[in-house]
Image: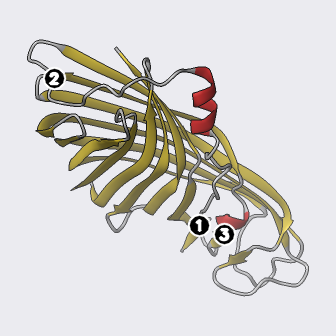
Amino acid sequence: MFASITSKLRPASTVAAALAAAALVAQPIAAQAQATPKADVWQTNLTLYGWFPGFSGQTSYPADTGGSGLNVNAETIIENLKMVFMGTLDVHNGRWGVLNDIVYMDVGNDKANTRDFSLGGAGLPASLTADLGLDLKAWVWTVAGEYRVMASPSYTMDVLAGARMLDLEETLTYSLYGDIAGTGFSGRTGSRDASQTNWDAIIGVKGRWAFGDRREWFVPYYFDVGTGESDLTWQAVVGLGYQFSWGAVSAGYRVLDYNFKSGGKVQDLSASGPEVAFTFRF
């Protein structure tokens, strides 16, 4: 039998103050026109993110030999975003460009003396409780070539094609206390691991719409969809930004979703939540 786990992490904070804070430390200028760059002129944007996602997903952990499955609803466990790193490097020469986006996430939490679990789908004995811990680590790397199909001082659109890699590792630990007779579960303490590495081909679009007296405000957007070792993966971002002499600051909402092929330990994974982005232009 298998144990299943459903995980969800609520957003850790709001980001509405990000634009106001940036306005205190830099004077706005007229937005740089996002028209097609001249050939042989390199334009580089480095973007650093703060992302505060919630997670949902389904993972199956093998049970002990001869034992029942341990089923945990991790929405009641995961609360902490331990570490996150996100960065994007976008380089253009003429109409052509290359996008590199890297995300590292480490989330998890422990919960003591809880009854938010089941053994083999059966009800729990009255005296049974558990200490549970869940840790999720993931690297997500998106790399794609770009071609600018629309360009004006107010609007740009790039089409893109490339690949995305997901390297995922989940660890569930448990200690059971009380009567486990009749549950079919063997062992009071232990841990379960699930890991997966997926490569998928993706296609998508990205760009921005600038507005305001000097086009200092803009709406960035991004969407991709793909398949390969996953049944389906997609990612979407939309936000609101403000242009400065050194680059830009924006706040938005980001969704990353995976549906995996049947038969694997990890069946699906989704992360979504607000983000803040600081872009530096070179």
- The N terminus, quarter of image: bottom right
Is disc 2 placed on a helix, strand or loop? loop
Mark 3 to mark 1 CA distance (whole Å): 5 Å
Q: Which kind of residue does numbered mark 2 sit on?
A: Pro
Residue where numbered disc 3 is placed: 72
- The C terminus, quarter of image: top left
Q: Is residue 39 above or below residue 132?
A: above
Discs 2/1, front: 2
Labelled disc at residue 5: 1
For marks 2 and 1, the one nearer the N-term is: 1
Label 3 with label 1: CB-CB less than 8 Å:
yes
Labelled disc at residue 37: 2
Mark 2 to mark 3 CA distance (whole Å): 53 Å
Depth check, front residue: 116 or 160: 160
Residue 244, quarter of the rendered image: top left
| Residue at figure coordinates x 66%, y 64% from the top left | 74
Residue 55, quarter of the rendered image: bottom right
Discs 2/3, front: 2
| Residue at figure coordinates x 64%, y 41% from the top left | 17
For marks 2 and 3, the one nearer the N-term is: 2
Q: Which kind of residue does numbered mark 3 sit on?
A: Val
Q: Which kind of residue does numbered mark 1 sit on?
A: Ile
Mark 2 to mark 1 CA distance (whole Å): 48 Å
Report crowding for label 3: few under 14, some 14 to 19, many 20 or more residues within 10 A (C-alpha): many
For marks 3 and 1, the one nearer the N-term is: 1
